[in-house]
Image (cartoon, coloured by chain):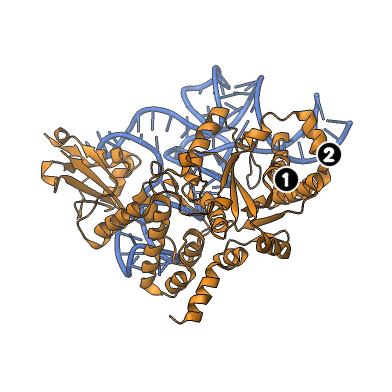
RNA sequence: GGGGGGGUUCCCGAGUGGACAAAGGGAACAGACUGUAAAUCUGUCGGCUAAUGCCUUCGGUGGUUCGAAUCCACCCCCCCCCA
C-alpha cells in the first residue's frame, strides 16, 4: 500500500464524526449543523441519548441509537446513556396513537438492570461491574471519554412540583407545545396531561445534563425531534448554553414493516428472548434492498469492506447478508456465538454436521416408547406450531419434515427409530428447525 | 350537564335475530418458483377432533327469545357537537 493511501484511510478513520454518521445513514436532522461541526472539531463533546426501560432487554430497534453513541465514542467524544427511569413513569406520547401502559416502579427497576448490562457491551463505561461481561465492551476508549450511565429518576423523582413549575415550567409556551407533531397527532385520539408533560421532562433532562455534565448534544430517533428541540431551547433559557440536537432516521424495512419485527415478535438483544441462532437468521433473511443500509447502520465494518460488499449482486448478495449477520451477531453476542450460529446455519442450509446452536430441547426417551410421541403434539410443544390445529395444517400442506423426510401422515408418531445421532430433527417450512435431543 | 356517533376475530373494516367462527383487505404461515432475497401464483389463517361435531369469541354484566355480534336494561371506554 502506498504511503499516501495509508494516510488517507487513516484520515478517513479519524474523519469527522458527522461525516461518518452521514455516510452510515444516521443523519436525519440537526439543529445547527455547522455549529455542531465546529464544536466537535474544538473539543471532546459530551452527548446523550435516552433509552426507555419498557422491557428488560433492548431490541434491534433501540440498537440504532446505541450505535450512534458507539460511533460518537469511537470518534473520541463522551457518550451518556440515560436509562429513563424517571420519564418511563410518565410515558412518551411520540409516535403512539394511544395512552401508553404505565409501568410500575418495580417493573422499571427490573428493566433498568437488564438494559444497563446490555448497554455496557457496546460502550466503555469504565465501570468494572458493568464492563466486566464475557466479551467486554466493543469500544476501548481512553479515560477522558468514558461513557456515563445515568438514571433520570435520580433528579426527576423527588422534584417538587411547585418548584419545578417555577424553574422550568415558566420557560415553556403551551402555544408552542401544541404545535408539536407529537401533540398534534394525538389531539384526535386524546392526550392525557401526564403525557403532555413528557417533552418538558425530557427537555429538563437535557438541561440537567448540560449543567452537571457539560453535555452539549442530544441524539435520538427522529420521533424525538420535537422533544430534543425543546431541550435545546431550555438549555439556552435556563443555562444560557448553546447546545445541539441530532436525529436518526426512523427505520423501516424495504417492505415497510417496522424494524425488527418477525412472526415471533421483536428481535431482542437478550439471548434469553432471541437466541443467537435466531438473531443471526434474522439478518441473513433480510430483504436484498436492506442489506447495504443495515451494513452501514448496524455493523462497525469499515467503509472499504462495506463498499466491497455493496458491489455484490444477485445471488452473491447472500455473502453480504452472511457478513452482516456475522458482524451484528458478533457485536451483540460475541464472536464465538456468531461463529456458532453461522456454523449451525451452514449445517442446516448447506448440509453439514455441526448443528450445535440450532434451537433444541431434551426429550425423555420413554416418551418415544409404545405408540411413540405424536408428531402433531411434538410440533406444538416445542413451539414450531402455535397449536395442534396449526401443526395439523402444516403437515397437511406438506410443510413438515422429520430428519429431512417430508411427512404427509397427520398421525405420524415419533419413535426411537427416528433418533439419529442422539437427536430427532424437525423442520417446518424452509427455515424453522428444532432438534429433540434424546437420552 | 345536554345531544349525536362508536367499541367486531393480530390490524383495518363489513355485518342489525337463524344460512356467522363472522364478508373484504392487510399482516402472517405453508406450497410452487428462487438465491435461506423480492415479485408472482395456490392454499391456510380461534381451540379441540381422524371425522361428524363440540367448545370459546364480536367492550362488560344481566335479560328477552327455540335461537343474539345483531333486540332490551344497566355499566365502562372513545370520538363529535352544544353548555
Q: Position of residue A151 (x, y in %)?
A: 60, 37
Residue A329: quarter of image: bottom left
Q: Name the residue beneath numbered marker 2.
A: A170
* Element on which disc 2 rests: helix
* Element on which disc 1 rests: helix
Q: Position of residue A223 (x, y in %)?
A: 65, 51
Badge 2 and badge 1 both on one subunit: yes
Specify whether residue A229 is in view: yes
Q: Name the residue beneath numbered marker 1.
A: A183
Name which residue lies at 79% across and 31% down.
A163
Frontmost residue, A106 versus A285: A106
Which image quadrant: the N terminus of chain A?
bottom left
Which image quadrant: the C terminus of chain A?
top left
Residue A96: quarter of image: top right
Frontmost residue, A402 versus A309: A309
Q: Which chain is blue?
A: B
Q: Using the image, name the chain to which the residue with label 1 belongs.
A: A
In this rendering, the answer to whether A41 lies above or below A226 is below
Colour for chain A in the figure: orange
Q: Position of residue A208 (x, y in %)?
A: 70, 41
Distance Cα–Cα, label 2 vs label 1: 19 Å
In this rendering, the answer to whether A7 lies above or below A178 is below
Frontmost of labels 2 and 1 is 2
Q: Residues within 10 Å of mark 2 (few under 14, many from 20)?
A: few
Frontmost residue, A320 versus A379: A320
Q: Residues within 10 Å of mark 1 (few under 14, many from 20)?
A: many
Frontmost residue, A44 versus A369: A44
Amino acid at each position: 500500500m502506498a504511503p499516501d493511501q495509508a494516510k488517507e484511510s487513516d484520515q478517513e478513520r479519524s474523519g469527522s464524526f458527522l461525516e461518518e454518521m452521514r455516510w452510515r445513514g444516521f443523519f436525519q436532522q440537526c439543529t445547527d449543523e455547522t455549529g455542531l461541526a465546529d464544536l466537535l472539531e474544538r473539543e471532546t463533546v459530551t452527548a446523550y441519548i435516552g433509552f426507555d426501560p419498557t422491557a428488560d432487554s433492548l431490541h434491534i430497534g433501540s440498537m440504532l441509537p446505541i450505535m450512534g453513541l458507539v460511533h460518537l465514542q469511537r470518534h473520541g467524544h463522551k457518550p451518556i446513556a440515560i436509562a429513563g427511569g424517571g420519564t418511563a413513569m410518565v410515558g412518551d406520547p411520540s409516535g403512539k396513537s394511544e395512552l401508553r401502559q404505565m409501568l410500575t416502579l418495580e417493573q422499571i427497576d427490573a428493566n433498568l438492570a437488564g438494559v444497563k448490562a446490555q448497554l455496557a457491551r457496546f460502550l466503555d463505561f469504565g465501570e468494572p461491574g458493568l464492563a466486566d461481561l464475557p466479551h467486554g465492551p466493543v469500544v476501548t476508549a481512553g479515560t477522558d471519554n468514558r461513557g456515563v450511565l445515568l438514571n433520570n429518576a435520580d433528579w426527576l423523582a423527588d422534584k417538587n412540583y411547585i418548584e419545578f413549575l417555577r424553574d422550568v415550567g415558566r420557560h415553556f409556551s403551551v402555544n408552542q407545545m401544541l404545535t408539536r407533531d407529537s401533540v398534534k397527532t394525538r389531539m384526535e385520539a386524546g392526550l392525557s396531561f401526564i403525557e403532555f408533560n413528557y417533552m418538558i421532562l425530557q427537555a429538563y433532562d437535557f438541561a440537567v445534563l448540560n449543567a452537571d455534565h457539560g453535555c452539549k448534544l442530544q441524539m435520538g430517533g427522529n420521533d424525538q425531534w420535537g422533544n430534543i428541540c425543546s431541550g435545546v431551547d431550555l438549555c439556552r433559557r435556563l443555562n444560557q448554553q448553546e447546545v445541539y440536537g441530532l436525529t436518526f432516521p426512523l427505520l423501516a424495512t424495504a417492505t415497510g414493516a417496522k424494524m425488527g419485527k418477525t412472526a415471533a415478535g421483536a428481535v431482542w438483544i437478550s439471548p434469553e428472548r432471541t437466541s443467537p441462532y435466531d438473531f443471526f437468521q434474522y439478518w441473513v433473511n433480510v430483504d436484498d434492498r436492506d442489506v447495504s443500509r443495515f451494513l452501514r447502520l448496524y455493523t462497525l465494518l469499515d467503509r472499504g469492506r462495506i463498499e466491497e460488499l455493496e458491489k455484490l449482486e444477485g445471488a452473491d448478495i447472500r455473502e453480504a447478508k452472511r457478513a452482516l449477520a456475522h458482524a451484528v451477531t458478533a457485536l451483540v453476542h460475541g464472536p464465538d456465538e456468531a461463529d456458532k450460529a453461522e456454523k449451525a446455519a451452514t449445517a442446516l442450509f448447506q448440509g453439514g454436521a455441526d448443528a450445535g446452536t440450532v434451537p433444541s430441547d431434551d426429550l425423555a426417551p420413554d416418551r418415544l416408547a409404545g405408540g411413540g410421541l405424536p408428531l402433531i403434539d411434538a410440533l406444538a410443544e416445542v413451539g414450531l406450531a402455535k397449536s395442534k390445529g396449526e401443526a395439523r395444517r402444516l403437515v397437511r400442506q406438506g410443510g413438515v419434515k422429520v430428519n429431512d423426510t417430508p411427512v404427509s401422515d397427520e398421525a405420524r408418531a415419533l419413535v426411537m427409530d427416528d433418533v439419529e445421532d442422539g437427536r430427532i430433527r424437525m423442520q417446518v417450512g424452509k427455515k424453522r428447525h428444532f432438534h429433540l435431543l434424546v437420552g
